């Protein structure tokens, strides 16, 4: 069944057409991606992990976190047993009758081993900024507007650096954030990346700490962990700022997506 599905030979016309589209151009409309996942999981009865892997291998705009969480949501693993089903009438309407699937499942069987959702963990420990010490501001993709924080204007900002990014869209956002920060602290030296002797220069300018936005988990958090060790070797602290609304809201983020299907993005 898995091999037939991957070859577009399931016998369900919309599903097979979407397989061809995925393989030919590497793209599907987001709504079609959801219908594809629903049919894969509940009509064909295939593991969501295999479906996510298949889609991951073909999409040109794939995002690992988004696709994994979206497939888990489809499988009913992020809304405590609640699942949706593909709708043949809706598919016919959305495709102007070009696709008219038959035999689509009317009942969702949710994998029993994935329903348990662990409680949210507490916010990890982190070092807060010290108003008495001059600082270098480190802008990351996690927080692009540190200059909007009132407490940042109580600290002597001597330098500004940017944590480099891999994707062009992130680099554009960081460059824009850097312009805002430079306008806010015109007396500060713009150092570029801290990984390129930025810490040594910041220390020479009198900085006793590096202040950045709080990064809960992921690539930025891992890089900050390593940079913290480098900063410590230069005699500086790496301090993070956790916005108060984040600290209050995060414990209540217990769902995989908003109630509406339109909020789901593969």
Image: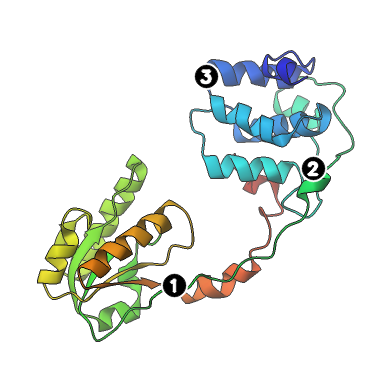
Residue 58 in the image: above or below residue 213: above
Mark 2 secondary-structure assignment: loop
> Which of pointers 3 and 2 lies earlier in the amino acid sequence?
3
Where residue 32 sits, quadrant-wise, is top right
- Judging from the image, the colouring scheme is rainbow
Task: Say which residue label 2 marks.
Answer: 84
Q: Residue at x 43, y 73 (%)?
A: 126
Callout 2 environment at 10 Å: few (<14), some (14 to 19), or many (20+)? some
Tag count: 3
Q: Position of residue 151 (x, y in %)?
A: 33, 81
> Which of pointers 1 and 2 lies earlier in the amino acid sequence?
2
Q: Residue at x 81, y 50 (%)?
A: 82
Residue 54 in the image: above or below residue 146: above
Q: Residue at x 63, y 15 (%)?
A: 20
Residue 244 in the image: above or below residue 85: below
Callout 1 environment at 10 Å: few (<14), some (14 to 19), or many (20+)? some
Let me know if residue 143 appears in the view: yes
Where residue 243 sits, quadrant-wise, is bottom left
Task: Say which residue label 3 marks.
Answer: 25
**CA separation in Å, label 3 and label 1:** 42 Å
Callout 3 environment at 10 Å: few (<14), some (14 to 19), or many (20+)? few
Residue 126 in the image: above or below residue 108: below
Q: 154 and 227: which one is in front?
A: 227
Mark 3 secondary-structure assignment: helix
Kindly check if marks 1 and 2 are in contact, taking CB atoms under 8 A apart as contact: no
Residue lying farthest to the bottom in this orientation: 132
Task: Say which residue label 1 marks.
Answer: 242
- Front tag of 3 and 1: 1
């Amino acid at each position: 069944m898995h091999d037939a599905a991957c070859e577009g030979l399931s016998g369900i016309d919309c599903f097979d057409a979407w397989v061809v589209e995925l393989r030919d151009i590497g793209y599907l409309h987001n709504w079609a991606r959801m219908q594809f996942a629903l049919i894969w999981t509940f009509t064909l009865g295939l593991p969501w992990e295999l479906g996510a892997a298949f889609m991951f291998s073909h999409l040109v705009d794939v995002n690992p976190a988004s696709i994994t969480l979206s497939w888990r949501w489809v499988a009913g693993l992020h809304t405590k047993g609640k699942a949706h089903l593909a709708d043949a009438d809706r598919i016919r309407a959305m495709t102007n009758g070009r696709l008219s699937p038959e035999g689509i499942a009317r009942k969702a069987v949710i994998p029993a081993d994935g329903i348990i959702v662990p409680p949210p963990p507490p916010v990890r420990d982190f070092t807060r900024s010290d108003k008495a010490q001059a600082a270098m501001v480190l802008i990351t993709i996690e927080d692009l507007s540190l200059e909007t924080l009132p407490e940042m204007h109580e600290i002597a900002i001597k330098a500004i650096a940017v944590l480099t990014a891999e994707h062009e869209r992130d680099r554009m956002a960081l460059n824009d954030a850097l312009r805002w920060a430079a306008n806010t602290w015109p007396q500060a030296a713009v150092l570029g990346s801290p990984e390129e002797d930025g810490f040594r220069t910041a220390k020479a300018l009198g900085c006793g700490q590096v202040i950045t936005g709080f990064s809960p988990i992921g690539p930025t958090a891992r890089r900050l962990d390593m940079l913290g060790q480098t900063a410590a070797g230069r005699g500086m602290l790496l301090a993070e700022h956790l916005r108060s609304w984040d600290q209050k809201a995060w414990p209540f983020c217990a769902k995989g997506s908003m109630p509406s299907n339109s909020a789901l993005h593969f």
